[in-house]
Image (tube, rainbow, N blue to C red):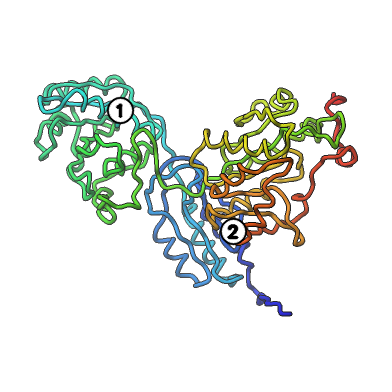
Amino acid sequence: DEVITARLEAGDVHEDEAATRIAGAAAGSGVRAAAAFTGRVNLIADVAGIALLDEARVGAINGVDEAVTLATVANYSIVQPRQILATCKIIPFAAPGAAVDAATGHAGRDGPLVRVAPFRDQPAGLVQTTSGAVSDKALEKTTQSVRARLERYGAHLQREIRCRHDEAEVRAAITALLDDGCAPILVVGASAIVDRRDVIPAAIVGAGGGIDRFGMPVDPGNLLLLAHHGDVTVIGAPGCARSPKFNGFDNVLARVLAGVAVSPPDIAAMGAGGLLTELAARPQPREGAEDAAQSHRVAALILAGGLSRRTGDVNKLLATLDGAAMVAQVADTVLATSARPLVVVTGHQAQEVRAALAGRDIAFTHNPRFAEGLSTSLRQGLRALAEIDPEADGALVCLGDMPRLRPQHLEKLIAAFASAGARAVCVPTFGGRRGNPVLWGRAFFAEISDVSGDVGARHLIGAYEEAVREVAMDDDAIFVDVDTPEALAAAGAIPAARAS
């Protein structure tokens, strides 16, 4: 009976276009802009490292016009691939063109606003001093903690030296690690450093180095010592370095391993937000694992195990289309997006399907019950995903016979999921009709695994309409599956049996 519309005024820029322009200008190295969805574009890390941004320009963008907003992670945040670094959101349905131009100018002025300095594989050295107060078990636990921390930030422990808590012995150990090319060098003492003339700082100076700063306004981590020997950073680690939990030591070490300079003023600036004790929002890596803040992680499944009954003797997935097997085209489309890992479920002609997908970053799982229908492949795929990436927040379920899908179709679904959360079902639409693929939040994985027969999980969409997010597409590729001889011929596909 009634339709509510929004009419743009002259000079207005549609919300999606506005967000895309601003976010695109802001994205620097190690960062990509996701597809726009309801006036929002997320900037996502492509690599693990340190997020670097210009806080003044973030403020300038947010001061341009109330229609334009940009929210970011804190400067110098430790980030992982696929983590959201920033989100540009246009508040109304459109923004004034002049405001969009001004915000875009701020975002790109003097270089992109947001970038990631990637972690680099560096050969770190470790000195541990010993005394009667530190057991061998505690020393070994510290070694494991330091090694895991280094590996988390892309580096490795090249050599460890243990010596008495004595200035001459520590000096000799530091010199030996320098001669071995270790950088950075970490020194964990049997007792805490109490001032600049204590054993560890004296040993660093005695080896030819210099002290940059002792003490930091971060707790845990107050008693950190920052020093150098030439171009090599030397860190007198605080006692909390023995713990696998995130602490002030991480603030400094992570920057060093990403090649980001850390100066005494940088450490002084860590005081705001430096109280880490018992803050639930602070990343708390589990021992032997990482639990850093992540965006909603989306994995992908390609169901490629069917019998292709409707195409007779021809396995449609192996038919050659534009020079590649159809299933390979679908896989390449998924691999061009941020969805990882990609799990392909095989069944009928499993070896041939694997061969068609050789050389790609794909995990395979075989469904021995493929003849019983689509639901068995779906269950097998989710079971494999739970083993490969138990932290995945959602799964993009793709069919192997939809070669017209393009990365932008999938990225729109992923962008919608990032906004909606892990209890959402994101469904593509065109002309008011729903199509494939569907992105399911992990909240539905258990129920999907209970589906039976030669059907997918479509009926669950109807049962959970309140969780559905319809994502409008620009074309009908979401409906096009090539599953009959006529469809193969119309698409110009060459059946595998006749492929040259």
Return the residue at label 1.
144
**What amino acid does circle 1 point to?**
Gln
Instruction: Describe residue 16's horizontal placement relative to residue 120 as left or right.
Output: right
Q: Are marks 2 and 1 in contact (CB under 8 Å)?
A: no
Disc 1 crowd, CA 10 A, few/some/many (<14, 14-19, 20+)? some
**Residue 156: quarter of image:** top left
The mark closer to the camera, 2 or 1, is 2
Residue sitting nearer the eye, 183 or 281:
281
On residue 467, which mark appears? 2
Image height check: is 377 above or below 56? above
Tag 1 secondary structure: helix
Q: Position of residue 497 (x, y in %)?
A: 85, 24
Disc 2 crowd, CA 10 A, few/some/many (<14, 14-19, 20+)? some
**Residue 355: quarter of image:** top right
Q: Which quadrant is home to the C terminus?
A: top right
- Which of the two discs, 2 and 1, labels the residue nearer the N terminus? 1
Residue sitting nearer the eye, 44 or 455:
455
Which residue is painted at 27% across and 34% down in the image? 233
Which residue is painted at 77% across and 35% down in the image? 326
Tag 2 secondary structure: helix
Which residue is painted at 38% across and 52% down in the image? 75
Q: Position of residue 468 (x, y in %)?
A: 62, 58
Q: Position of residue 496 (x, y in %)?
A: 83, 27
**What amino acid does circle 2 point to?**
Ala
Image height check: is 13 above or below 394? below
